[in-house]
Image (spheres, grey):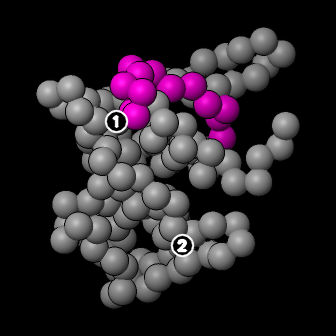
Amino acid sequence: MTLMDPIGDMLTRIRNGQTRLLSKVEMPSSNLRLKILEVLKTEGFIASYHIEKKEKNKISLIVDLKYYEGSPVIKDIRRISKPGRRVYSRATSIPRIQNGLGLAIISTNKGVMSDIEARKNNIGGEIICRVF
């Protein structure tokens, strides 16, 4: 089965897992997904993630979801730039999510990074998703 939007699928799995109060979510692996999960882990939105080998050399990611006092840490996770409509932003016009409490994940020519890092390095790029 091929996915038209693998990043959207990953975000939906995380959103659905936290709605069901699951401790772990499994998904297929890719380099872009690893980079996005690294940003989420660095910013404290997920507990951790690890790579697991399956049969026929398939690689999957196991994401440990994070909760605070029984409620999910991630309140809202949305895909901004979609395959049918890409959204790009300059470094000066990167949106602030929930007045700085949230996070925008941006794909730049220097790699995938948070909006705070992109503003600090004065780099624009494609806005992948927003997390609050």
Q: How many marks?
A: 2
Q: Residue at x 63, y 67 (%)?
A: 82
Q: Residues within 10 Å of mark 1 (few under 14, many from 20)?
A: many
Asked where in the image residue 41 lies, by quadrant, the reply is: top left
Find out whether residue 26 is within the magenta segment: yes
Residue receiving disc 2: 126
Q: Nearer the viewer, residue 128 or 80?
A: 80
Q: Residues within 10 Å of mark 2 (few under 14, many from 20)?
A: some
Q: Residue at x 33, y 87 (%)?
A: 92
Q: Which residues are magenta?
A: 18-30
Residue 32, percent from left and from top: 60, 49
The amino acid type, in three-letter code, at marker 1 is Ile
| Marks 1 and 2, how far apart at CA | 22 Å
Q: Is residue 22 above or below residue 29?
A: above
Q: Is residue 91 above or below residue 74?
A: below
Q: Quadrant of the C terminus?
A: bottom left
Q: Nearer the viewer, residue 1 or 111?
A: 1
Residue situated furthest front in the rendering: 20
Q: Is residue 80 visible?
A: yes
Q: Is residue 25 above or below residue 96?
A: above
